[in-house]
Image: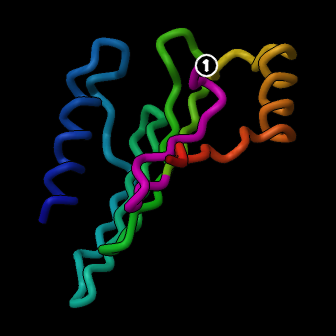
């Protein structure tokens, strides 16, 4: 299945990365292949601290992973993917800067003072 192929690619990517123990062993692996309704789930953990799990169905996917970065920082990421896209959540992900106060005031003004409806020229 596609999920199993993605899982294998993820493992290969982890094994080929320079910053992880190439001698890491798989400590646990669980795989429930897709059933008749398209539901599936899998999870694995390696001896160097990588943990990954995912469950999904035709309507979407939910998953989580954790590992230690080359700088020694614990990285945790959870995500969902559905008809509205991919939604990752993690403290290590960049966030946009706050919206400036003057922009918030302008938006509030626009909200409270909507433009008048356009009038057609009457002849």
The residue shown at (36%, 14%) is 19
The answer to whether 26 is drawn above or below residue 75 in the figure is below
Give, as a single range, the part of the protein colored magenta: 80-94
The residue shown at (20%, 49%) is 6
Q: Is residue 39 left or right of residue 81?
A: left
The answer to whether 110 is drawn above or below residue 42 in the figure is above
Q: Is residue 119 left or right of residue 104?
A: left
- Label 1 element class: loop
Q: Quadrant of residue 102?
A: top right
Q: Quadrant of residue 21?
A: top left
- Residue located farthest toward the top when viewing the structure as drawn: 71
Circle 1 is placed at which residue position? 73
Out of 70 and 35, give the one closest to the viewer: 35
Q: Is residue 52 left or right of residue 109?
A: left
Total marks drawn?
1
Q: Position of residue 84 (x, y in %)?
A: 43, 55
Q: Position of residue 16 (x, y in %)?
A: 20, 22
Out of 39 and 99, give the one closest to the viewer: 99
Q: Is residue 92 magenta?
A: yes
Q: Is residue 10 magenta?
A: no
The answer to whether 11 is drawn above or below residue 84 in the figure is above
Q: Position of residue 49 (x, y in %)?
A: 49, 36
């Amino acid at each position: 299945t596609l999920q199993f192929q993605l899982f294998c690619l993820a493992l290969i990517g982890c094994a080929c990365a320079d910053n992880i123990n190439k001698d890491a062993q798989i400590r646990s692996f669980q795989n429930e292949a897709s059933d008749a309704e398209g539901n599936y789930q899998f999870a694995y953990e390696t001896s160097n601290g990588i943990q990954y799990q995912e469950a999904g169905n035709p309507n979407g996917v939910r998953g989580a992973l954790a590992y230690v970065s080359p700088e020694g920082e614990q990285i945790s990421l959870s995500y969902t993917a559905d008809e509205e896209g991919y939604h990752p959540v993690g403290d290590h992900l960049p966030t946009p800067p706050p919206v400036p106060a003057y922009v918030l005031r302008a938006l509030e003004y626009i909200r409270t003072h909507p433009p008048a409806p356009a009038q057609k020229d009457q002849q």
